[in-house]
Image: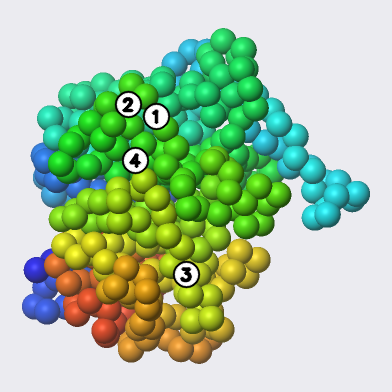
Amino acid sequence: MASRILLGTRKGTFIVEKQNGSWKPRLAGHAGGGVNYVARDPYTGKLWALLGFGHWGAKLSVSTDEGETWSDNPAQIKYPEGARYIGQDMYEDAGSDFGVGIKIVTRPATVQKLWIIGFGPGGAVYVGTIPGGLFVSRDGGGSFELNRPLWNHESRGGDLFTGEGKGETKWFGTPASEGGEFAPGIHSIVVDPRNPKRMLVAVSTAGVIETEDGGETWRPRNKGMLLDHTPEPDAEWGHDTHYIEQCEGDPDHIWQQNHVGIYYSSDGAKSWRKVSRPEQGVHFGFPITADAKDGRTAWVVPGKSDMQRMTVDGALFVARTTDGGETWEQLRRGLPQEQAYDVIYRHALANEDGAVAFGTTTGNLYVSDDGGEGWTAVANNLPPIYSVRFA
């Protein structure tokens, strides 16, 4: 039974533990600093926190004593000299449809955000970043190296070290600053438990990308996904995947919350099927979590729309499917049903052993011990919650 939750928040790392039947949160580290993501390495038990401090920048922090103490990891994430990326700048343009124009720019690569961390056997640690670099460690975090085949993939326009582009980039941006700067970012890492050389990453904005040879080669896995707001709705690249998660016990079942709806794959991401139900308010959102045993079961916390990033009709609910997205059930008991405008970030929903938890941008943490049937407000005054993970 789940008894521990790790939270990454705008003001530190929190650990939530179940004591005498009740969940109790406590500040466990990095007080006052931004923590984008916290997770446990299931192979070593080490806790990892991805920091984004305003003054000190992006850092990896680790704990080997269950979060009692934290220290900077000796090896930090750093782009090699000469690395560059292609991004976009937005500017005011009164003559365009939306009043803005976009300029393609090439910039030196620096770590703007540590966004996601994933783990594999044999000391493998993977870190996804903005501006779209995947860093790999084969020694438990003792050293990290940029995966160059993905960084220099033809879909990105060519060799991003020499700057000699071979074509148009198909990787577009996610907000990298408040100044209109956009850069691609890796926010999802899925390692196949049957074959650690097979891995999926998801990029905003490019789509789902797969390697089957440990990162030597990469290919898109976006068949069936639609860019229904663009002139090329069936394009191979340019998909705004918000998050993907696999069923650990049946890894061919993979769930995706996308900017344009919810997708489900039962063939290991070879193809996707759209399973949104807009008429039920189950369509737009950021997080999704897959049951660890039943590949046909998943949960989402819907938002109203891209242009209205808040709850549907001011009421908070979780939607659950148990039949591969054919039907969705709205789970509302214990959640606020009026004057609730919470937003849930892509990493802030998780499940384990029948427990489901999610945190909101307004510092509310909700936990269900029965698969989402009923909810308890564990805390209402935490900092904005960036990530929720059972540990």
Q: Is residue 131 left or right of residue 117?
A: right
Report whether residue 46 is seen. Answer: no
Q: Earlier in the sequence, mark 3 or mark 1?
A: 1
Q: Earlier in the sequence, mark 1 or mark 4?
A: 4
Real-space Cα distance between discs 4 and 3? 22 Å
Real-space Cα distance between discs 3 and 1? 28 Å
Q: Are marks 4 and 2 in contact (CB under 8 Å)?
A: no
Crowd band around label 2 with a 10 angstrom C-alpha radius: few (<14), some (14–19), many (20+): some
The percent position of residue 159, horizontal first and vertical second, equals 54, 16
Q: Which residue is mark 1?
A: 218
Real-space Cα distance between discs 4 and 2? 10 Å
Q: Amino acid at mark 1?
A: Trp
Q: Which residue is mark 4?
A: 200
Q: Amino acid at mark 2?
A: Gly
Q: Are marks 2 and 1 in contact (CB under 8 Å)?
A: yes
Q: Amino acid at mark 4?
A: Leu
Residue 215's disc is 2
Is 291 placed above or below 335 here?
above
Q: Earlier in the sequence, mark 4 or mark 2?
A: 4
Q: Nearer the viewer, mark 2 or mark 1?
A: 1
